[in-house]
Structure formats: structure tokens, C-alpha cells
Amino acid sequence: MSLRRTETAQDTTKSITLTPDEDDKEIYENRQLYGILDTNIVGIRYYESSAAVGEYVLVRREPVNSYDHNAIRIDNVRRQRMGHLARDVAAQLVPLMDSGELIVDGVLAGTRSEFRWPLSLKLFGIARHPEKWALRIEMLRKKLPVQELDRAEAARQKKQRALRRQQVSH
């Protein structure tokens, strides 16, 4: 099961919807995990919704939000509004989401308190060279995590060195 970006005619928000089919591969085909951002859903006291720890949530852009044009809304899988990402977090993610450089998946990371709900955001970016290095630099500038990208690159380089040593020894 994965998340897919869609847009509806009645609602100008960009949304992410769950799709359990072959299209899953297409969405993430040229993507790789850059990092995991631990944050919170805020504004939860204004909405009646429920979800369990570990449950995927829908991450929706809400550009027509009258309070914040950078709003990122979080809904449970039943499409009940849970709240939003904090303004400072949304402001960092929105340009990269809107440009298509970043796909963001959300998973509930803890139990709800009175004002916050812990959330882990998985940030998937472009896997092609040199675009991924430009995106990495932009994410670092915005103080967004890239530890998974760096870990994967270190593993790739280690594997290449081992293959070169093996070729030399034969």
C-alpha cells in the first residue's frame, strides 16, 4: 500500500490517497528515501478524529487555507481531518512538495496529547544524478533530514570499493 498524489475538481487541495495496486511502483520508481522527519500534528483539539500509532496518514497540501497558504493538512485513512503540520515545518516542505521534488508519507509515531500528535514524515526525493545532489543541498539548507540518503550513498560506495578490490585480486 502506498500514497498517491491526486487533485479533485471540488477541492483545490493536493491530496495523497492510499492505493494498494501495481501503480505503487510507478510513484516511487525514481525516488529514494532521503530522511525521516519527526514532527507533530498541531491544531488537533479542533477536530474529532482517531487513528492508531503506526497508522499511515494522508498528507495533503491545502494552498487555499485562509490562515496559511503553505498549509499541510493531515487526515486519517478515513479522510477525517486530524490537524496540520506546524507553520515552520510546512514552510520548509511546501516548495519541494509543490515542485514534485519531494513526496511525503506520514506515519503516526505516538499517542495523541491535548495539543499535539507525534508524526514521522518519510521524505522521498529524486534518485537521479545530479538532481538528487541539488535536492540534498536544498534540504540541508532548509534543515531537513537527509541521513537515509547519506547512509545509502555510503553503503553504495563501500560496495563499489569491495568490488574493485575483488576485481584487482583476480
Image (spheres, rainbow, N blue to C red):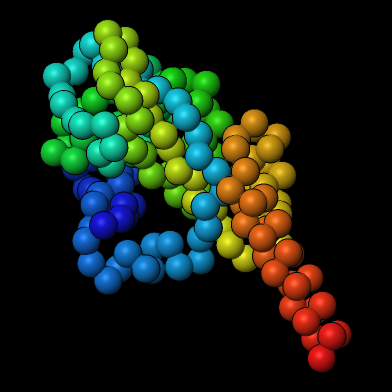
Q: Tell me the quarter of the image containing the C terminus.
A: bottom right
Name the residue nearer the viewer: 134 or 147.
147
Q: Residue furthest top?
A: 114
Left or right of 140 on screen, residue 46:
left
Report x, y in % for residue 58: 28, 40
In this picture, is 137 found above or below 161? Answer: above
Task: Judge whether 88 appears above or below 63 on screen.
Answer: above
Residue shown at the point (68%, 37%) measured from the top left: 140
Q: Is residue 75 visible?
A: no
x, y percent for residue 95: 54, 39
Say above or below: 149 vs 63.
below
Looking at the picture, tell me which residue is in the foreground, 40 or 70.
40
Q: Is residue 34 visible?
A: yes
Picture quadrant of residue 60: top left
Relative to 134, residue 168 above or below: below
Q: Residue at horizontal 16%, vertical 26%? A: 50
